[in-house]
Amino acid sequence: MEFQKDNTFFTGRLKSMGFALQGAIKLLTTEHSVMVQSSVCVLLIIAGIYFDITMTEWLCQTLVIGLVISVEGLNTAVEKIADFIHPNYHEKIGFIKDIAAGSVFFAAMTAIAIVLMIYIPKFL
């Protein structure tokens, strides 16, 4: 069966949102790193409620949570494509995958810095 793109505005957008939701569910249920990051997300939400963080702190925390999980999703997609194209080890594929993982590192370090700026003063 051949894929038929739905070009109508409303139903096409609904179908796109459905595919995006399916992708998010696949990401959350199959990727261990995203499972860990989601667990940290829940802990940060609980901490935010407990410490009664400000609206600005909520905005920053929400932004970095979304940033890390989004970049992790892109990293996973790059890795899956690379493994599909070249299942065996290849130096150039390894280089590409390392760069994708490096982007997750930068997002995670940014998130850690922001979370520390929010919560360290709460403990002092």
Image: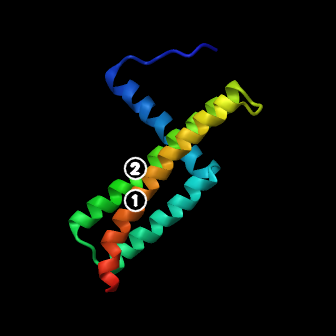
Q: Is residue 6 left or right of residue 96?
A: left
Question: Would you identify the image quadrant in which residue 70 lies?
Answer: top left
CA separation in Å, label 2 and label 1: 8 Å
Amino acid type indicated by mark 1: Ala
Residue 28: percent from left, percent from top: 56, 51
Q: Secondary structure at mark 1?
A: helix
Assign the C terminus to one quadrant of the image. bottom left
Which residue sits at x=37%, y=56%?
64
Q: Secondary structure at mark 2?
A: helix
Which residue sits at x=52%, y=59%?
37
Q: Looking at this view, is 49 or 81 the one in front?
A: 81
Which residue sits at x=48%, y=41%?
21
Count of labels in the image: 2
Viewer-side label of 2, 1? 1
Residue 81: percent from left, percent from top: 62, 30
Answer with mark 2 or mark 1, whichever residue precedes in sequence.
2
Question: Would you identify the image quadrant in which residue 1 lies?
Answer: top right
Residue 76: percent from left, percent from top: 58, 41
In the displayed image of the protein, which residue is found farthest to the bottom? Answer: 124
Q: Is residue 54 left or right of residue 23?
A: left
Q: Is residue 88 left or right of residue 17?
A: right
Which residue sits at x=47%, y=37%?
20
Q: Which residue is mark 2?
A: 67
Q: Looking at this view, is 41 or 6 the one in front?
A: 41
Q: Are marks 2 and 1 in contact (CB under 8 Å)?
A: yes
Q: Which residue is mark 1?
A: 111
Residue 16: percent from left, percent from top: 43, 30
